């Protein structure tokens, strides 16, 4: 049975992590980077846009690799490799763009604020900030 960690971020840079398994995790299987998934799977109002992920060994998903299989690519930069100097290239093992049982973490983006999508309001956050000051 599939089990994932879903990391949801918003445009302001706020992120939240959710653990999903069972039927909620099955909603993600077979989906590809760039597709939209109903946020109810993680308890969020709105749609989530899948932006990436990684497998159990930490290998990143690359959008240009079809399927969910492993592939070795000669990379000049981008997801999975950051060169330290100009012209540097490296052969890196990456996973395809499709979510499978091998995927452990899925990265997603939500339009708007994640706090609003979770139903958290600013009054609660201000009260928590006041409690922390005391």
Image: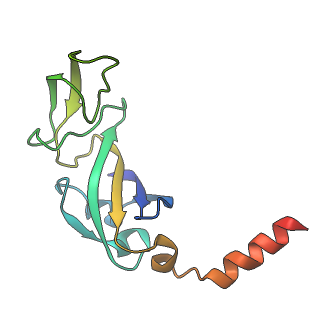
Q: Is residue 59 left or right of residue 5?
A: left
Query: Could you say where residue 98 lies in the image, as x and y percent from the top left?
Result: 17, 48
User: Would you say residue 9 is visible in this rendering?
Assistant: yes
Left or right: 79, with 132 as reference point = left
Residue under the image location 57 percent in, 79 percent down = 120
Left or right of 11 in this view: 29: left
Q: Position of residue 95 (x, y in %)?
A: 21, 35
For the point 17% across and 45% down, the residue is 97
As drawn, 13 above or below 103: below
Q: Which quadrant of the view contains residue 79?
A: top left
Q: Quadrant of residue 39?
A: bottom left
Furthest-left residue in this view:
66
Q: Position of residue 48 (x, y in %)?
A: 31, 67
Q: What is the quadrant of the C terminus in the image?
A: bottom right
Q: Is residue 110 left or right of residue 131?
A: left
On the question of residue 1 being in view, the answer is no
- Count of labels shown? 0
């Amino acid at each position: 049975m599939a089990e994932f960690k879903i990391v949801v971020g918003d445009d302001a840079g706020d992120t939240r992590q959710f653990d999903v398994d069972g039927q909620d995790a099955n909603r993600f299987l077979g989906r590809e980077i760039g597709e939209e998934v109903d946020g109810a799977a993680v308890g969020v109002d709105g749609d989530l846009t899948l932006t990436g992920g990684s497998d159990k060994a930490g290998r990143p998903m690359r959008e240009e690799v079809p399927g969910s299989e492993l592939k070795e690519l000669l990379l000049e930069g981008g997801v999975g490799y950051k060169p330290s100097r100009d012209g540097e290239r490296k052969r890196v093992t990456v996973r395809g763009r499709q979510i499978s049982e091998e995927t452990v973490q899925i990265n997603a983006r939500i339009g708007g604020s994640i706090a609003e999508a979770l139903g958290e309001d600013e009054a609660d956050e201000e009260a928590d900030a006041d409690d922390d000051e005391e």
